[in-house]
Structure formats: C-alpha cells, structure tokens
Amino acid sequence: MNILLVFILVSYFLVCFVSYSFLLKLKYLISYHLGMNLAMTSSGVMGIAVGTVLGYAFPAHYTMITIVTTLLAIMIGAVFGALVDYQTLLSGVSTGLMAGIMGPMIGVVADLGLIAFCTILLYAMFGMLCFSVRS
C-alpha cells in the first residue's frame, strides 16, 4: 500500500473521530431527523470512501476488503445513530451495510482521481454534518 493511501485512510478516521467528538458534546441538540441524517451520511460516506481506498490498494483481496469495510461502516452507523435513539441506529446500520458492500466494488475499478473525489466528498459531508447542528 502506498504511503499516500495510508495517509488518506488515516485522515478519514481522524475526520470521523473529530466529528463524532464534536457531535457528542451537542448530543441533546440533535433532533430525530438530524440524527437520522447523521447516522446515514456518516456510515454511507465512510463505507464508500474506505472501501474505495482499500479496494484500490488490494484488488486481489476483494472478499476480505468487502467484509472489513461492511463491518466498519455498520459500526460507524451504529455509533453515530446511538447519539439519538434506536431508530436512527437502525438507519445507520442499514446504510452502512449497503455502503460497505458498494465501496470495494468502486475501489476495484477506481483510479486516484476517484479516490480524490471520495476524499473531498468525505471531508465536505462531515463538515456539513457538524455545522448543521444549531446551538
């Protein structure tokens, strides 16, 4: 795996962790609708972005990459969904399941341009999620 891809992958998890830490402080300001958007967007974007990078880096290990990415996206959806209630947790899990399966499919046929697009998309989505909470 290229050092650039490692840096991109670590930055994904860093952005996700910082966003979750920020949203955890504002947990009581998050409504049901926003919580559902938080859970679905975070698990979907992380599943597709991480799956794309790992699928691009290791195309020969497609099955293992798909399993790892799907479990990771499900966990992220559950963690972000647990900020509100069980219905948002279920929405995050189901979106994580779909995105985790789709991400490696995209990654196997991707190039660096698509990885750059996924990276910009991930940063933009987590930024919008954090700034959508009204205090």
Image (cartoon, rainbow, N blue to C red):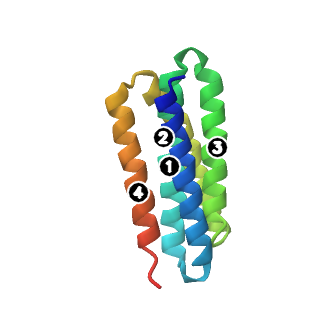
- Tell me how far mark 2 sits from mark 4, CA to CA: 12 Å
Circle 3: is it few (<14), some (14-19), or many (20+) Cα within 10 Å? Answer: many
- Tell me how far mark 4 sits from mark 3, CA to CA: 18 Å
Tell me where residue 89 sits by quadrant: bottom right
- Which amino acid is tagged 2? Ile
- Which residue in the protein does label 4 denote? 125
In the displayed structure, 84 sits above or below 128; it is below
Nearest-to-viewer mark from 2 and 4: 4
- Which residue in the protein does label 1 denote? 44
Tell me where residue 107 sits by quadrant: top left
- Which amino acid is tagged 1? Gly
- Which residue in the protein does label 2 denote? 48
- Tell me how far mark 3 sits from mark 1, CA to CA: 11 Å
- Which amino acid is tagged 3? Leu
Q: Secondary structure at mark 1?
A: helix
- Which residue in the protein does label 3 denote? 72
Q: Position of residue 98 (x, y in %)?
A: 54, 42
Q: Position of residue 64 (x, y in %)?
A: 65, 25
Q: Secondary structure at mark 4?
A: helix
Circle 2: is it few (<14), some (14-19), or many (20+) Cα within 10 Å? Answer: many
Q: Secondary structure at mark 3?
A: helix
> What residue is shown at x 61% (from left), y 27% (from top)?
65
> Which one is earlier in the sequence, the residue at label 3 or at label 1?
1
- Which amino acid is tagged 4? Met
